[in-house]
Amino acid sequence: MKLLQHGYSVNTTIRPQSLSSGSKKDISYLKNLPGAQERLQVFPADLENPDSFEAAIEGCIGVFHLAHPIDFQGKETEEMITNKSIRATLGILEACLKAKTVKRVVYTSSAFTVMFNNEGPDIVVDENSWTDVDYVRNANYFGASYSISKTLTERAALEFAEKHSLDLVSVIPTWINGPFICPSIPGSVTGSLAMILGKENQVQYFKSNPFVHIDDVASAHIFLFEYPEAKGRYICCAVEITMDKLYEFLCARYPEFKILSPESLDDKTVKFSSKKLLDTGFRYKYGLGEIFDQAIECCRQKGFL
Ligand SMILES: NC(=O)c1ccc[n+]([C@@H]2O[C@H](COP(=O)([O-])OP(=O)(O)OC[C@H]3O[C@@H](n4cnc5c(N)ncnc54)[C@H](OP(=O)(O)O)[C@@H]3O)[C@@H](O)[C@H]2O)c1
């Protein structure tokens, strides 16, 4: 949506089964976007078959790679997820080289690639920080396979880009929240609003919680695609708040809801430095109040609240 608003012609991908006739997946929210009829093409592609991305990439000047096999339920082993993700990402990067038109790839990484290590209890992470995958594996952290697969995939992507002189920039968003255009409620919005939407005794947050509005994340991706000097990794984090302060904030701002008491997943304070992104001139538009107001309003409009 944001790329269309910026005037770009966009090829996007969707899993083949979601495009087949009889599929229950409703993608009218994409096809009805302003400008979509003239400038949006939807291609079938699956991470299980990396070559399937070639048709969508052909002729493009930029590629934004966001898809990741996210599995917080542990349906597949960490090894299966990591292998699938690395194979798919490197296949997509191969397709970018093959296309010969791609000027820059913007890869969507995650805060989980920088925040987990044996240091603490209070740490500041920046673009030089990397999650220690052995530590995560041994500590069996929440979302361990996600954290490990994202970390190893981002490392593999950066190495591939270096080796093949491919211009690749990596965006490291923290916890994304805000309004959504898809019909179902995104996982990170459900998680962010767990104190409102969740069930008693199942509401878990980290001790410190770094948020960013979806609109700012999308803008940062496009900004970094267009910014000539962009290089390497960029943390994208607008606001940070401890779990206890978030509870107080939600109770005060939304007295109409019964706000559930959260439990902490850890006892560490992790601060995210956004200095590198801010030094480029990029500015966040949304603070904590707008992030939560707009997520809640969108949930209300779509009948989730
Ligand atoms: N949300 C956050 O707070 C957050 C924070 C930091 C980074 N990120 C990153 O942002 C990206 C998007 O995440 P999200 O939060 O929007 O989660 P999501 O909705 O689950 O997005 C994952 C996407 O990957 C696609 N995908 C998964 N397996 C696939 C496969 N085999 N073939 C093709 N596509 C496949 C999914 O397609 P289906 O819809 O068909 O399943 C979905 O569109 C991810 O790279 C994630 O690591 C998210």
Image (cartoon, grey):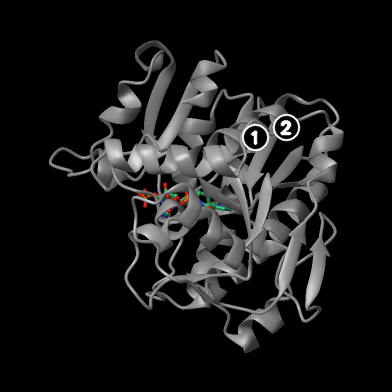
Q: Badge 2, how many Cα within 10 Å: few under 14, some, many 20+?
A: many
Amino acid of disc 1: His
Name the residue at 71% across, 75% down. 268
Residue at image position (43%, 67%) is: 71
Per the image, label 2 sits on a secondary structure element best described as: helix
Q: Name the residue beneath numbered marker 1.
A: 221
The total number of labels drawn is 2
Question: Can residue 248 be seen?
Answer: yes
Label of residue 224 in the image: 2
Query: Is ligand 1 closer than 8 angstroms to the Cβ of mark 2?
Result: no
**Label for residue 276?**
none
Viewer-side residue, 236 vs 23: 236
- The spot of residue 97 in percent (x, y) is 67, 37
In the rendered view, tell whether residue 209 sits above or below residue 224. Answer: below
Judged from the image, the secondary structure of the residue bearing numbered disc 1 is helix
Q: Amino acid at mark 2?
A: Leu
